Amino acid sequence: MRKYVLKRLAQVMVILFCILTILFVLFRLAPGDPVTRMVDPEMTPEESQHLIEQLGLDKPIWTQYLIYLKNCSTGQFGYSIHYGEPVAKVIWEKLPNTILLFTTAVLLSAMVGISWGKIAAWRKGKATDLVLTIAALVTHTLFLPWLALLLVWIFAYQLDWFPITGMVSDEVWLDPTAGFFTKAADVLYHMVLPLTTLFLIHFGSYLLVMRSSMLDTLKEDYIVLARAKGLKERDIRNKHAAPNAWLPVVTSVGLSLAFSINGGALTETVFSWPGIGRELVFAVSQNDYPLAQACFMLISTVVLMSNVVVDVLYAYLDPRIRY
Amino acid sequence: MARHYKFACFTCKVVAAALLAVVLFGLAPASQAASNGMLKVGVLEEPKSLNLWLASDAWSNRVLSMIYQPLFVREPKDSKLVPWLAAGEPVYDAGKMTYTLKLRPAKWSDGTDFTAEDVVFTGKIIKEFKIPRQSSKFSFIEDIVAVDKHTVRFELKRPKAIFLTRTLTTPIVQKKQWEKVVAEARKSEKPLSALLRQAVDHPVGTGPFMLAQWKKGVFVYMKANPYFFGKGQVIEGYKMGPYIKGIIFKVFGTADAAVLALRKGSIDFYWNSIQAGYLDQLKGDSDIKLFVSKKSGLYYLGFNLRKAPFDDMALRQAVATIIDKEFIIKRILQGYGEVLYSVIPPGNTFYYNPDVPKYGYGMNHDQRIKKAYEILKAAGYSWEVPPVNGQGQVQKAKDIRLPDGDPMKEFVILTPPADYDPHRAMSGQLIQEWLRAMGMPAVSRPMAFGALIQKVKGQHDFDCFILGYGKLSLDPGYLRSFFHSAMNKANGWNMSGYESAAYDALATESNNAMDLNLRRKMIMELQKIVMTAVPYIPLYNPTIIEGVRVDRFTGWVQMLDGIGNIWSFCDIKPK
Amino acid sequence: MALLTVENLGIGYQTAKGLLKAVDGVNFTLEPGHSLGLVGESGCGKTTIGMALMGLLPPNGRITEGRIILDGLEISAMSEDELRKVRWNKVSMIFQAAMNALNPVKRISAQMAEAIQVHRPEVDDHQAMERVEGLFNLVGLPLERLYDFPHQYSGGMKQRAIIAMALALNPKLVIADEPTTALDVIVQDQILKETKELQRQFNIGIIFISHDISIVADVCHQIGVMYAGQLVESGPAEEVFFNSQHPYTQALVRSFPTLAGPKTKLAPIPGEPPNLTGTIPGCRFCDRCPKDTASCKLDHPQWRQVGPGHHVLCDHC
Amino acid sequence: MSQSRENKTILQLERVSRFYRTRGNVFRGGGRLVVALNEINLSLRAGEIFGLVGESGSGKTTCGRLIVRLEEADQGCITLNGEDITHLKGKKLRDYRRQVQMVFQDPYQSLNPQVTIADSVAEPLITNKVGSPLDHMERVLKVLNTAGLSPAEDYVYRFPHQLSGGQRQRVAIARAIILEPSLLVADEPTSMLDASYSAQIFEILQGVRDKMGATIMFITHSMASARYLCDRIGVIYRGHLVEQGPAEQVINAPRHPYTKALIDATPKFGRAAEVPTYGTLLAAERPATTSAGCPFFRRCALAERLLCAGTYPPWHQVGPGQVALCHLLEDAAPAVNSG
Amino acid sequence: MQQATIKDLKAKRRALWRQRFMENWRVFMHNPLGRIGISLLIMFGLMAVCSYIPPMIDPMYHPMTGVDPKVVSSVGPSWQHWLGTDFMGRDIFSQLLAGARVAFLVGVSAAFMSVVLGTAVGMTAGYMGRFTDTALMRLADMIMVLPTLLVVLMLAALFGQLSIWMIVLMIALFRWPGVSRIIRAQTLSLKQRPFIDAARVSGASHLRIIFRHIMPNVLPLAFLYMTFRVTSAIVIEAGLAFLGFGDPGTVSWGMMLQWVWKTGHMFQAPYWLLPPGICISLITLSFYMLGRAMDEVLDPRLRDETQAG
C-alpha cells in the first residue's frame, strides 16, 4: 500500500512539473506583458523599460524559468504583479473561502445525491424515481451562471431573503460586540445562495451516478440471496446494496472534481465570493502571471491529490482491491 | 464496509444539521448600531494595494486619495489648482529657476508633524527609484530643499509647464514611515521592485480619513482622521469636515449588485459611473439622487500612419467624415456622452479648442457618404461600384481602389473586447459597417487588452484601433506624447506614427512654457494641426452618472469627473 | 403429509413481446427428507420454479395459476411480510453462482450470522458466531478463514460457505440451483457427496436443479424432467433413467457420455426449444420428436402413469 | 479408430514450459513465478482425436494456446510436421495458422457481437486472401452446413446474439474449419453449453475428423466426454502431464493416482456400481515439504513420504502406448471395490 | 452459386441491418427521455435553420449589427420584437436563433473532434499497452485534472480573443481524456475477449483487429460519449462567453447572458435574462436525455430487463 501511494505521489509530482512547465511556456508565449498593458499616458517608455528590468521580465527565458521553478518549489510562487504581495499570501487569504464554499457544496450534494439516488434506484419506475431522476436531470443541466443569476434575482432581489453577493456584511464584522458565532452565522447566511447554486448543479450528477450504480448492484446475486435470507427490504437496501453501489460513486466524485471546479469559479464570480476561482479569473484578465500560475497549480494539485486520495480510499474501502 | 458507508452518512448528516442550524441563526437581523454616521460607498473592486507607489488603479486611488494628500488640488468650480497642503501660491524666482513654497501646519495621522522634510523625501525617492508614473514629473528638478520646517524650495533644471500642474499635485508620503523601507529597498538588487513589493498595512497620511480595517475582498473601513489639517478651516469656500465618522468601502463584484445595494439602502453612494440601463429605475426612486457630470475622457479611433492605406490623409479625413459620432453616442452610450471633435475634451474648458475641423458635423448618413466620396475621388480613389451613382444617389459601394489603382487590402480595426469595454467593441462594429458601405474592406476585431496594446504600442503592427482614456489629465502635456515624432518608437506613446516637424517644435515649446496663456494659445494651435492630419479621430467622451441616497447624507460637491472627490467627502454631513 | 406440494403451477413473465409463460401446469410433491431433481435445458423454467418456491420471482414475473404449499403454508398466497418469515427459516437456497451470491464487501462470517440474527433476534452476536463456527465445521471449512472476505475463498469454499449458510436455520427444504456448475470435477464430487450426507443427517428435503442429468442422477431420489416450461416426466430416479418413457428424456439420457457401460453412439437432440411467448398448441416437443405424429401438433398431451410413481406427459408412450 | 490411420506424428511438443509472473502486490512486494506448464512432452498423430484432461488451472488451455501461437512458450519447442513453429513470425505465422485452428470455450465470447455470422466465418478466408468474395459466400454456406447449421442461408445474416449457445459454438467450429486445417484445437467446446448440446458438438467434431481428416486436440475436464470422443488421452495436473495412453485403457485401467481420482469424481449417471472407485485423493492437502518432489504429492493418498516428496517421478510404460508419471506403479494398490 | 441466391442473400443482409436499426430505434423511442430529447433537438435544429431568416427580412434583425432605428434602449416584447430588444436595440429573438446555430456548431464539432481524438488515443493505448499506454494515459491524466473552462479562459486571455473555431479546438483538445479512458478500458476488456484471440488465430493482422473487431465495439460507446461531450462543450463555450472571453464576433447564448449581466439588465429585463438561459439548459438537457436513451439502446443489460430473467 505504501509503495502504491508513493508511486502515485511520484506520478503526481511529475504531472505537476509538466503542468508547471506548460504554464510557464504559455504565459511567456502570450503577446503582451504586464507592464505593456499599463496604458497610462503618464507612464513614459523609459519608466516602462525600467519597470520591466526591475520585475525581471527582461531576463533570458531560461533564467526566468529557473527562478520560476525555484519560486514554485519553495511554495512562494514569487510576487503578484498586480498586488505586489507574495503570491502565497494572496492565495492564503482566499483559499479558506473557497474551501468553505466548495467543500461544503460537494459534500452536501454528494450526500443528498447518493441517498436520493439510492432511493430512486430502489423505487425504479415508480413516481419517486421519475420525479427524482427528472429533477436531477434538469438541475444538472441548468446553465450554472444563469441559475446563479436567477437565484439572485428571485431570492435576493424579488424576495429579499438573502444578500445579493459577497461573503460577509460589514455591519457584522465592524460590530465589536459580534462574537465568533455571529460572524460565522453571517458568513453562512451569505453562503446560502452560492451553496444552493452549486448544490443544485452537482447533486443531480451524484444522484444519477448512484442510481445507475445501485441498479447494477441490485442485479447482483447477493441481493437475491439477501432477500432469500429474509432480510427486510430496508436492510437489503442499506446494508447490502448501498455499500457496494457507492464505491464507484466515490471514484466518479474524484474524476468529476476538475469539472466541478469550473462551476466553482463561475459561482464565485457571479456571487463575488472572494475565492481562488474568482481570483484566477481576475489574475488571468490582469496578466498577473505569478498569481494565475499559482492559482492554477493549486487547483491542479488539489484535483490530483484528491484523485490519489480517492483511489487509496477506494482500495481501503473495497476489500477486493489490493494494489 | 457497511460501517464506512454508515459513518460517511452520519458525518454528512451532522454537517448538514450544523449548517442548517447556523444558517437559521444567521437569519437574525444583524446589528446596525456600529454603522451609524458612517458613509457607505459601493465600489466594484477592492484596492489592489495600499502601497502608493504600486497602486495605479482607479480602485486603489479611491481609497488612497483619502489618505495621501498633494500640495495642490483642483477646486470644484473651474478645476483650477488651489493650495491644499501648501499654504499659498509658489513664488517663482525666474533667475535661479526656483519655486519656493510655504506649507500649511499639518499633522500626519499618527500625530507627528508634517514638515518640509516629508516633501523633500517624497521628491527624492521618486527621482531615485524612478517610480513609474511619477518620475517624469521630477526628472527636470535639480534639487528639492527644505528651507525650514514649513518652507520648501524646488530647483528646476529647465522650465517645464507640468511643474505646476503635475509635480505639485503629487501626493506626499511620510518620511518617518518610508525611511526604513526605502533604506532596505536600496540595499536590494532591484530597488524599485523591492519598493513596490513593500506591503503597507497602515498607510500614514495627512488626509481626512485613515485606514481602520481592511477585510480583503469585502470592505475597507476608514475612520475620520482626527489630525486632518483642514478640519474646521474654510478652503475655497467650503468649510472642511469631515463631518462623518468614517467611510466604509464595500466591494461588490458586479455593477448590478452595487446598484441594487444602493436602491436597498445598504450603500449611500456608488462610486462608479452607472450604466444607462439602470437609470430608469433609479430615476423613479425618490431616495436616490443622480448626478450627471462631465468627464475628462478621450475615446478615439487611431490609424497607423506608417503604412498604406492610412498613410494617406485624405483617406483618414474621409473616414472621419463617415463616422457618425452622434449615432454612436445615442446608441451605444444611450445618450450619456458628448461628441468629441478635438483630442482635448470640452470639459477641459481652459485648453479646449472648439474651432477645429469638424468632419461630417451636422450631416446625415447620405450626406456623409457623398462628402467622403468627394474627398476620396479628389484624392484619386476609384471604385468598382462607387458609393454615389451617376444620379447622385447613394448606393452600396464595392471594392475601393487606391490612387495607384491597387485594390485596398482588408484592414482590421482592433478594439478591446466586449467584456473590457462594450462601448468600444461595438463602436468598432458600427464603424466597420459604415466603412463597408463605402466599399472599404474593414474588419472589426476585438482583441484581449494586453495583446492589443502589444500590437499597437509595442510592435506597431496594426491598421486601426479604438482606445481611450477615461481619466485624462487636465494638463495637455499628453499632446506632445501622443504625436511627437520622438515618441514614435516601440512602446512610445505616438502609436499612430504621426510625424511633423512643425508640430514637434510647437509641442516641445508648449511643454516648456511657464506662462499659462501663452501655453493655451500653443495648445489650441496644436489641436488644429492634429485634427487636420487626423492620426486620431476623437469619437466620444462619456458622461459620468453617479447615484447617491439622499436619506442619510447631504452636501455632495459636483465637479469634473463626478462627485466622488475629496471635497465631497470633507463636506458631506449626516442628515 | 408431503413437505411440499406444487399444484398446477403456472408462472409468467411480462415482457416487451407479451406474456412469456415460463412455467406451465407443473405438479409435483416432495416428502420430507427426500430429494427431487429438476432437469432440463436452460430456459426450461426450472430456475423459475426454484425462485417461485422462495417467493423471489423478479418484479415482472408472477404466479398465474396454481398453488405452492410448503409444510402446510400456501407460499403462493403469502404477503411479502409473511414470506420474509418463511424464507431461510423453512426454505433456503443454494445459489447457482456462488462467487456472485456472496456480498463482496462483507465478511463471510458476518453474512452467515446475519441470516441467523434476522430470524432469531434473540440470538446475540456471540451465540451467532458460535453457530457460524459450528456450520464451518459441518461443511469442512477451516475456522481460521472465518473472517475472510469472499474473494479470498476458492470456488469450492464459497460453495461450501453457501451450503453452510443454507443450513444455518435448519430449514425443512433446501433448493439447490445448479450448485456445482462452475466447479471442477473433483470439487463438484466432494460437494455433491457432502450435500447428500447433510441431507441424510438433517433429514432435509432438497430440490436439486441442474441441466446436467448425470449429477441429478447421482444425488436425487426422484427426478422431474422439464421441457419448455412443462414437467414432461417424473418418477423415481432409477425408473426415469433406465426406463425413460418420454422421447425427450430418452434423448437426454442418450445424449450424455458416461464412464460406465458400453460406449454407445451418442444421440444428439436436433433443433432448438420453442419460443414460450404466446400460446403453443399441442406438444411442445413435437418439433424435435422422432415419434411425432400429426395429432401431436394439435392436441395437448395428457399425463399418464407408466410405472409406480412414474408419470409422463406424452400420448405415445 | 486410430489403428485404421497411419501413425504419423503431426504435432510434437518437446519439453515445453510456460511461466506466468503474477502482478506485483503492494502488500507483498514483487510478482511470483507461476508454472502453467512444466516440460510437457506430447505428440499428436495425424487423424486422431487427442483428449487433454485436467481441472481448471491445470494448464490445459495454456497448452492449446501455445499450439495455436496465441502465447509463446518460455522453453522447449513445438513442431508441426517436423517444422519448428515455436518462434514463427509474420507471414510464416499466418501460413502456419492456415493449418492450425482453434475453437474456444465460450461461444458467447468468441464471436464478435458486432459482426454478422457470415463475416465471422469468412474472416479466415479474407485474412488469408483465399478466393473471391463470391467464392467466400459459397464456402461459408458449405461449412455452416457441415457444422450442422442448415439451412445455412437462414443463419448467415444474423448476429451472434440472435443464436443459441449451441448454434454459436457451431458457428465457431465452422469458422475454425473453413480453411480446412490439419490440426484443430478444441478448448472445452461444450463446458459452457447445456449438457444436451454437447452431443451435437461431439458429433460435429467427429465429422470434422472423419470427413476432413483433421487431427483434433480436444481439451476437456470431463473424463466421460474424453472417453466418448478421443482416441488417446493425456491427463494433466497443475502443469505436469501425468498419464497418457489410449482412451479406453486410461479410463478402464488408470495407473496414475490422479487419473484415478478424476474417474472417482466423475458422476456415474446412475450406474455407480459398474465403475470401480479408487479413493486415491486425500481429503485435505498435506503441506509440501520440498518443491523437487512429485507434483501430486500433496494430494496423493498413496504417496510415500520419503520417495514421493523428495524426487521427481519417472515415466513408466504401463501398457501398450500407455505411460504414467509415478513412483508407485510397480506396487500400486489394486483397485478396491472393483465390480 | 446462382445469381438468385446471391440477390436473396443481399436482400437478407439489408433486411438485417434495417431490422437492427429499427430495433434500436424502437428501444430508443420507447424511452420517454429519448422522445423528449429528440423533439427538443429537432426544435433547436429548426431554430438554428431559422436563424438565417431574420436578417433576410430586414437588416435591423441582424443579430450582431442590426439595430432598430426607433429603439435606443432595452424594451420588452412587442409585435416587432417578439422577445424585445437588447440595450442597443438589437432583436433578442434573432439573437436567440443565431445562438442555436452557434450552440450546434460548437457542441457538435467540439464533441466530434474530442471523441475522435479520445477514441484514437484510447484504442491505441489500450491495444498497444506497455510504454505507449503509460505515456498516453499519463498525458490524459494530466489534461484531465485541468478544469477546461479555466484553461480555455486563460488561453483566451493570453492570446487575445479566441475565434469560435479556436474555442472549439481548445475544448476538443482538453476534453478527450475522459473519452480515451473509457475507450481504453473498453479496448482492454475487448482485448481479453476470446473473439480477439479467434481473430488472431484466423490470421488477422493488428490493423484488422483494431478496425474490424475493436472499433465496431467501441464506436457505439464513443458515439454515446459524444452526446455527453456535446453538452459539456456547449456549457464550456457558454461559460466562457459569459465570463467575457468568448468570440466577440459571435452571438452565442452565453454572450447574450454576459450582455444582460454586464449591462446590468438582469433585474429589469426578464425577457432578456430568461430565454438564453432556458435555451442553454434545455439544449444540454436534450443532448443529455439523448445520451441516456442511447445508453439504454447500447446496454443490453438494461434492455433485457423487460424480458425473461
Image (cartoon, coloured by chain):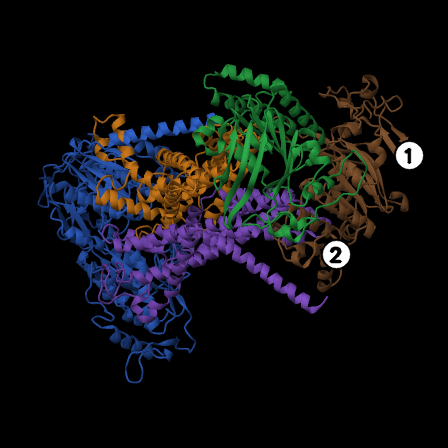
Confirm whether residue E244 shows in the render: no
Q: Where residue E79 appears, x then y in whole percent?
A: 24, 65
Q: Which residue lies furthest to the bottom in this view?
A: B391
Confirm whether residue B126 shows in the render: yes
**What element does badge 1 sit on?**
loop
Closest to the observer, B43 or C59 = C59
> Vertical placement of A196 versus E231: above or below?
above
Q: Quadrant of residue D29?
A: top right
Name the colour assigned to chain B in the rendering.
Answer: blue
The residue wearing badge 1 is D320
Pick whichever of labels 2 and 1 is earlier in the sequence. 2
In the rendered structure, are the residues bearing label 2 and label 1 in contact, judged by CB atoms less than 8 Å apart? Answer: no
> Vertical placement of C124 versus B223: above or below?
above
Q: In this view, does C59 lie to the left or right of B361?
A: right
Q: In this view, does D273 lie to the left or right of B368?
A: right
- Which chain appears purple? E
**Marks 2/1: CA distance?**
42 Å
Q: What residue type is labelled 2?
A: Asn
Q: Where residue E205 appears, x then y in whole percent?
A: 70, 52
Q: In which quarter of the image is residue A291?
A: top left
- Which chain appears green? C
Q: Where residue B478 appears, x then y in whole percent?
A: 28, 56
Q: What residue type is labelled 1?
A: Pro
Name the colour assigned to chain D in the rendering.
Answer: brown
Is disc 2 in the same subunit as disc 1? yes
Closest to the observer, D157 or C265 = C265
The image's mark for residue C146 is none
- Which chain appears orange? A
Which residue sits at x=52%, y=58%?
E22
The residue wearing badge 2 is D128
Closest to the observer, B77 or B88 = B77
